Amino acid sequence: LKSERDEDVVSRALTDQVIMRGKGKATSVSTSISHGAVFHPPRDKRKEAREAKKNAPDTAGAGWFDLPAPKMTPDLKRDLRLIKLRGTFDPKRFYKSHETKLPKYFAIGTVMDGHADYYSRMTKKERKNSIAEEVMSNDAISHYRKRRFDAVNANAEYWSAKRKKSAPNFKAPRSRGARGKH
């Protein structure tokens, strides 16, 4: 337990003026327990700005209507990779090449059919949950993919056989340690 003398010293120190030193200036701030005033250090604008930026939601900015950065899941990564590789699905279409890394800010939505698209829309059976499922179920894409795969394999087999025919038959060199022991 504190003595009465210690309590008196503490209360006197709190009611007196407190002198703060900062950047070469001495400023005085009065604090008093009896009046309810509390000492507050001066605001650091840079520190407050850093804290506000840290607590702000991760968006692309006002120029992009605050487009959020979605959480990357394996399914989402797979769909983004498929979108980047869409040029390999159809040999007659050309798409510009994109950056190598995946985008940070994007949104995925659902295309809503209009009234005019009634006869050209996809049936419920054709609709899938992800882009990967749609690509795998598309017959034209799978046919082209199989044809292309077979062509690449046939080319590899041709050159492999040609390399084997033209390569000279060398005997394996003997090790040096076995030469002197015979």
Image (tube, rainbow, N blue to C red):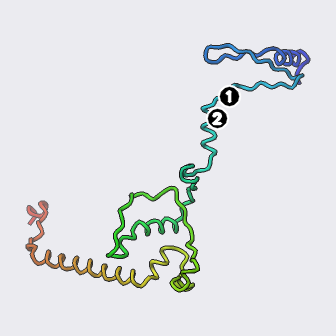
Identify the residue shown where x is 77% and y is 24%.
Answer: 39
Q: Which residue is mark 1?
A: 43
Is there CB contact under 8 Å for labels 1 and 2?
yes
Q: Is residue 18 left or right of residue 36?
A: left
Q: Is residue 125 left or right of residue 31?
A: left
SS at mark 1?
loop
User: Relative to the observer, which residue lies in front, 136 or 74?
Assistant: 136
Where is residue 57 shown, x and y percent of the image? 62, 50
Where is residue 31 shown, x and y percent of the image? 81, 20
User: Relative to the observer, which residue lies in front, 71 or 173?
Assistant: 71
The first of marks 1 and 2 along the sequence is: 1
SS at mark 2?
helix
Quarter of the image holding residue 97? bottom left
Eyeballing the image, is 56 above or below 95? above
Identify the residue shown where x is 36% and y is 84%.
Answer: 143
Say the numbered circle drawn on residue 48.
2
Where is residue 115 shown, x and y percent of the image? 58, 80
The C terminus lies in quadrant = bottom left
Specify few, some or many for label 2: CA neighbours under 10 Å numbering under 14, 14-19, or 20 or more: few
